[in-house]
Every structure is written in structure tokens, then in C-alpha cells.
Amino acid sequence: MTKKITFLGIETSCDETAAAVIRENDKGTADVLSNIVSSQISEHKKFGGVVPELAARAHLENIEYIIKAALEESKVSLDEIDGIAATAGPGLIVCLTVGLNIGKTMAAFSNKPFVAVNHLEGHALSPGLENKIQFPYLLLLISGGHSQYLIVKDINEYEQLGTTIDDALGEAFDKTAKMLDLGYPGGPSVEKFAKLGDKDFFELPEPIINKAGCNLSFAGLKTAVLRQAKKINGNDKLKFSLAASFQNTINKILYKKTKIAIEMFKEKINTSNINLVVAGGVAANISIRENLKKLSNEIGFKTVYPNLKFCGDNAAMIAWAGIQRFKKNLLNKTDVEAKSRWPLDENAPYMKGPGLKL
Ligand code: KG4
Ligand code: ZN
């Protein structure tokens, strides 16, 4: 029997301090031996968003305890760990540095391999913790900082088909929640209150819906929500209907854009076995899951979602990406530095800013 690889993963790119111990298993998926996530929701709640300095301080205060807890719960000693993986980007440098530095130091002192993980690759491979999915697959990555369609060809091999030209989808959810005073964190509260409203009550714009391939845009939608939010003046019933109409518009946009992305995928990859993986924090949204499931039944592809606990930021996905990279000998030296911007497809055009032609 070959030895199963075990990794410690560390994640501090935004507002979750997380550590996990993961071991690959005979099924080609993972045994999650521990997965500790300490959310900073209470710290950032009063500001309605993540405050970088507060986040960094909370990471510093918690990280040592979280790593110890993850090792203890896994019943694996540091000696038995085959390597250490920590998120090195993209994200807030002050936050990334906390987890990255402790990971690098632990690896250096224990003389173990170190992997600097791209947080987005963590999300991209996250369904693999529980499901063995064949490459290539189409990925819709929707989180607080990113919204992209990518072909995942292999570990470390990505082709971007489309991206947002302005706000990320999670950001649009968070801003909508803030404008409607629905509470923090925004995504889950919009989803909760949308259930109480009429999704067809407000007609909202679907920016760049008939152009720019599967690129996405949410800024115009956000402005329209703001305009309506001012008019309804705190009326609860209308607030819930605005949340519902916002979510419904997102679903209409994702439905149409995913259809285009599937067509592009088919053109590039000759396969009848199409898997769409939806990952990142926003992939926890049940109405989005159901909406894309409907599309998949209509045009014939399979949707794969990570377990809810692996959608939001966590270190299990970082350890898992670490194991995959380790197996391909994609290791890093311990002088690797944190990066605020780190696209999965380095050749993809930069789609933001003035002068953008669609
Ligand atoms: O992946 P993630 O935890 O962090 C980043 O890498 O950004 O994603 C966080 C984002 C936040 O914007 C949050 O509001 C959103 O995911 N989110 C949701 C839901 N749960 C989290 N958005 C919509 N519906 C949800 N249920
Ligand atoms: Zn994330």
C-alpha cells in the first residue's frame, strides 16, 4: 500500500482564519481530518464590510491557536505531515502575510515541503475533496472578489473564458444587503430575505447581457438597486421584494451567460461529458444552484457543487490544492511572497478600467 499524503493547510486571505489537515484516500478524494474556520463576522459586522487592519490583527491573534486546534483534532502530529500549504494570494497583503509567514516558518523549521497556494485554485479544486472529477471541466467561480468562467484543464492549467468587468458577484450581494440594511454578511442575508419577497416586482437591468460573450457586469444592477432602495424608504415588504428581484436578475444573468460559456467550452473541448463546477462563497446560494441545475437539465451537462462547508473560505481546499501541487512537484521556496493580484490564467486580458472595449 502506498503512503497516503497528508497536508496541513492555512488560509488567511480575507476575513476567515482557517487551518485544516487533509489526507488523500483510496477513492482519489480526501479524508478531511480537521477543518477549523474562525470567522471574523462579529468584528466586521458593525462596519458592514471587511476592515483590512482589523482582519490582519484578528488573524495574528488567532492563527496559532487555530493551527494547533487543527493538528490536535486531526490526531496527526506535525512529524507525520508530508507538507504545508498556505494561501499566498490573491487577497489583502496584510492578511495573506500572516498565514503565509507562519506556514513558511513551520515548513522551514520542520524541514518539510512548502506550497504557496493560489486561493482561486483552492476554490477551483474544492469539489475534488469529495468528488473525483475528470479534467477538463468548466468552472464558474463566484466569490467576494472574483466572478469568472474558466476551463480547468489540469492542476495549474487554466483558460479564462469570461470575467466580470466591474464588481464581483459576492460584492454585488454584499452591497445590496448594505443598501437594504439587511445585515452582514450580505450574501446569506439577501438569500434569506429574498424568500419573503416577490421576485418579479422590480424590473432591474441585466448589464452586457447580449454582448461580450460570457463576460459579466454587475455595477449597473447595483446602481439600479440603489435607486430603488432610496425610493422605498425602508418599507419591509418592498425591501424583501427588491432583494428577491435582485437575486432573480442575478439568476437570469447567470442562466444566459452560463449557456454561452457552455457553448464556448464545447467549441474548445471535444467531449460529450460536460461538467460545470460552481465554486466560491456565492456557490452556497441555493436559488443559484437550482437555477443552474435547471439549465443543466435543459441543455445536457452535469453540475457539481462543493459541499456547503467548502464553498466559503476554508483551509481544507488549500491543503487539498497543496496535495495536488505536491504530487506534480509544484513546490515553492520559503522566500515566496504574498501577491494581491494573481489570476489563474496569466494570459487572460485584464478586463477592468477605462478604455475597455467589449
Ligand atoms: O469565497 P468567499 O468566502 O470569499 C472570497 O474568496 O471572496 O466568498 C465570500 C462571498 C461574500 O461576498 C458573501 O456575501 C458571498 O460569498 N456569499 C453568498 C452566500 N454565502 C456567501 N452570496 C450569496 N448567497 C449566499 N448564500
Ligand atoms: Zn474565497
Image: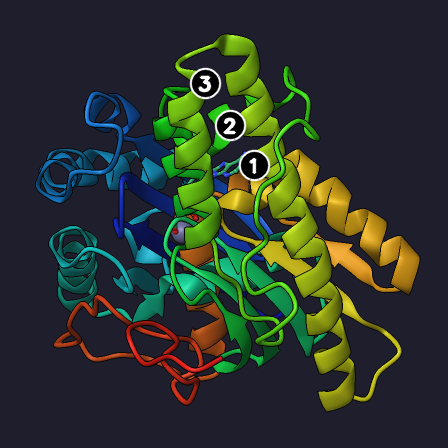
Q: Which mark is residue 232?
A: 3
> At which x and y percent is residue 32?
53, 45
Considering the numbered disc 2 on the image, is that residue within a helix, a strand or a loop? helix
Q: Mark 1: is the Cβ under 8 angstroms from ligand 1? A: no
Horizontal side, residue 272 vs residue 219: left or right: right
Mark 1 or mark 3: name the one nearer the start of the chain.
Answer: 3
Q: Which of labels 1 and 2 is toward the front?
A: 1
Q: Confirm or deny contact between disc 1 and disc 2 (CB under 8 A).
A: yes
Q: Which residue is mark 1?
A: 246
Spatial CA span between label 1 and label 2:
9 Å
Q: Residue at x 54, y 70 (%)?
A: 215
- Of labels 1 and 2, earlier in sequence is 2
User: What amino acid type is highlighted by mark number 3?
Assistant: Ile
Residue 106: name its quadrant. Answer: bottom left
Question: Horizontal and vertical percent for residue 303?
Answer: 76, 56
> Can the viewer see residue 313?
no
Which secondary structure lies at badge 1? helix
Residue at x 15% of width, y 68% of height: 108
Is 83 positioned to the left or the right of 132 in the image? left
As drawn, 265 above or below 70: below
Q: Which residue is mark 2?
A: 190
Image mark for residue 191: none
Asked if labels 3 and 1 touch by Cβ distance under 8 angstroms, the answer is no
Image coords of residue 323 (percent x, y): 46, 67
What amino acid type should be assigned to the residue bearing mark 2? Val
Q: CA distance from mark 3 to mark 2?
A: 17 Å
